[in-house]
């Protein structure tokens, strides 16, 4: 239905169970229409004889969904982080703020390449890692250099300089957490700027030539399982066997170095953010099989990164102590480790992958645990109150007024206008009764009018900007035959 009738009806429905016939109707009000309150109160007074319970729900868009713009990457998928609150409401409550004791949870969709989220600067590097993993599956590489202005000559000169400085023990810092970076990771910082297979092979050939000439480097992480790290260790042991730089081998060597670098970066951030106390704890919560195919490990690292972004987003808005952060990490990583996700098989990060990574985070938090600055700039995006009326132990009626900043029914939104109260018999009777009660002198009448105007203004401000609707569900027992 299109809300063109006097009651602005947009939906009618009926369902049947073994012993009940349930009817539904939804009525849509105009945007900013204040008569929704005046409509509910007089028309459902017959429900006062029943036992009611009132529960209110509201949501805040902390990071609202945003469509792509010209400056965004073509593969960007919007993020959306919502704060959800619920509490026991009063009969007269409509569009009121939740109490500070209201339980809250977070709905987190971290999207992809959305610059509003933490660690977005890492995503370009992860794009290179995923492209390399996809190339190992398909045999075709989509080069995405971090700095496309780097030429082959500049890259090769940088690789030679790095080897010389490492040999002399005076390598300058490279990348984040630089003091913990070994040679294979420092090479990744340079080689991730490759824009062709030829450029990569020539750069690796410089390293191979150095190893053939007796180059040795003992400063390698003991848990670094990359080909470059293994060759450095073999060279020190006098058992060097260099692989041929043919086919997909150069891409796999580069990917292994990138995975070591990115994994170590993630471990550092998990520890420094207080989600885990050590790399060993993270490994126990989210194990990565070092013997798995390199492209499979790229998929696992992608999920580990998305988990870090999701948890850091939660930490931005909720005050979590050390124990709560650890509990959050355990829940998120346990959930994510059970997912079967492979962006390297898809060739890109898809909306379906992001949908699978959606999180509902319930940390038994209260509204009081949300940083107060949130409410200085945010108002509820949606608000609803579920009024359940019981006849004994059985549900008799459900009323649910709903308010939203946007509508999913644009074909109805422009048709809905304010209810004319004079078209509603019960409201007319209310007004006549109200007039009888307020017979008085002229000064009292002026006073009442002033108060009424003030109340109407406050009410109008409260409803301004919201599309409103009302769900009415009636539960009717079927006769026994």
Image: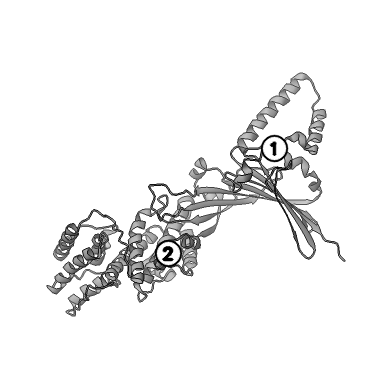
Residue 368: x and y in percent read 54, 48
What color scheme is it? one colour
Picture layout, residue 226 above or below residue 188: below
Q: Residue most toward the left?
A: 213
Q: Residue 451, located in which quarter of the rendered image?
A: top right
Question: Marks 1/2: CA distance?
Answer: 49 Å
Residue 82: x and y in percent read 52, 51
Q: Looking at the picture, tell me which residue is in the foreground, 319 or 21.
A: 21
Which numbered circle lies on residue 303?
A: 2
- Cβ atoms under marks 1 and 2 closer than 8 Å: no
Residue 238 makes an appearance in the image: yes
Residue 61: x and y in percent read 52, 48
- Dot 1 corresponds to which residue? 35
Q: How many marks?
A: 2
Q: Looking at the picture, tell me which residue is in the foreground, 395 or 283.
A: 395
**Secondary element at image label 1:** helix
């Amino acid at each position: 239905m299109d809300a063109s009738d006097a009651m602005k009806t947009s939906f009618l429905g009926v369902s049947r169970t073994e012993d009940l016939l349930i009817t539904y109707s939804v009525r849509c009000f105009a945007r900013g229409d204040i008569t929704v309150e005046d409509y509910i109160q007089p028309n459902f007074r017959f429900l006062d004889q029943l036992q009611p319970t009132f529960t209110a729900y509201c949501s805040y868009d902390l990071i609202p969904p945003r469509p792509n713009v010209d400056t965004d990457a073509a593969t960007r998928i919007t993020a959306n982080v919502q704060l959800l609150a619920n509490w026991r409401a009063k009969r007269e409550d409509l569009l009121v703020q939740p109490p500070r004791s209201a339980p809250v949870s977070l709905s987190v969709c971290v999207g992809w390449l959305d610059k509003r989220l933490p660690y977005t600067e890492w995503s370009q590097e992860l794009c290179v890692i995923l492209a390399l993993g996809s190339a190992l599956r398909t045999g075709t590489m989509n080069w995405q250099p971090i700095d496309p202005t780097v030429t082959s000559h500049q890259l090769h000169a940088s690789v030679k300089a790095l080897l010389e400085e490492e040999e002399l023990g005076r390598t300058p810092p490279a990348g984040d957490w630089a003091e913990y970076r070994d040679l294979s990771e420092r090479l990744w910082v340079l080689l991730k700027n490759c824009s062709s297979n030829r450029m990569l092979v020539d750069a690796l050939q410089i390293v191979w030539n150095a190893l053939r000439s007796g180059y040795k480097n003992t400063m390698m992480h003991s848990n670094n399982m990359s080909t470059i790290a293994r060759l450095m260790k073999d060279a020190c042991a006098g058992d060097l066997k260099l692989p041929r730089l043919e086919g997909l081998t150069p891409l796999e060597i580069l990917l292994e170095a990138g995975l070591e670098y990115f994994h170590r970066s993630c471990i550092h951030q998990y520890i420094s953010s207080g989600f885990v106390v050590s790399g060993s704890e993270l490994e126990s919560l989210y194990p990565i099989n070092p013997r798995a195919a390199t492209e499979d490990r790229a998929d696992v690292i992608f999920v580990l990164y998305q988990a870090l972004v999701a948890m850091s987003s939660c930490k931005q808005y909720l005050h979590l102590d050390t124990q709560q952060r650890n509990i959050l990490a355990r829940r998120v990583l346990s959930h994510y480790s059970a997912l079967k996700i492979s962006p390297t098989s898809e060739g890109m990060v898809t909306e379906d992958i992001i949908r699978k990574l959606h999180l509902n985070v319930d940390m038994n938090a209260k509204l009081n645990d949300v940083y107060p600055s949130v409410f200085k700039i945010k108002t509820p995006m949606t608000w609803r109150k579920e009024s359940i009326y019981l006849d004994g132990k059985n549900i008799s009626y459900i009323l649910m007024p709903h308010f939203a900043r946007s509508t999913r029914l644009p074909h109805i939104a422009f048709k809905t206008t304010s209810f004319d109260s004079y078209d509603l018999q019960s409201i007319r009777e209310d007004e006549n009764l109200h007039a009888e009660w307020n017979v008085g002198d002229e000064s009292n009448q002026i006073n009442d009018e002033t108060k009424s105007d003030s109340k109407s203004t406050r009410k109008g401000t409260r409803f301004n900007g919201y599309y409103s609707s009302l769900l009415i569900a009636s539960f009717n027992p079927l006769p026994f035959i």
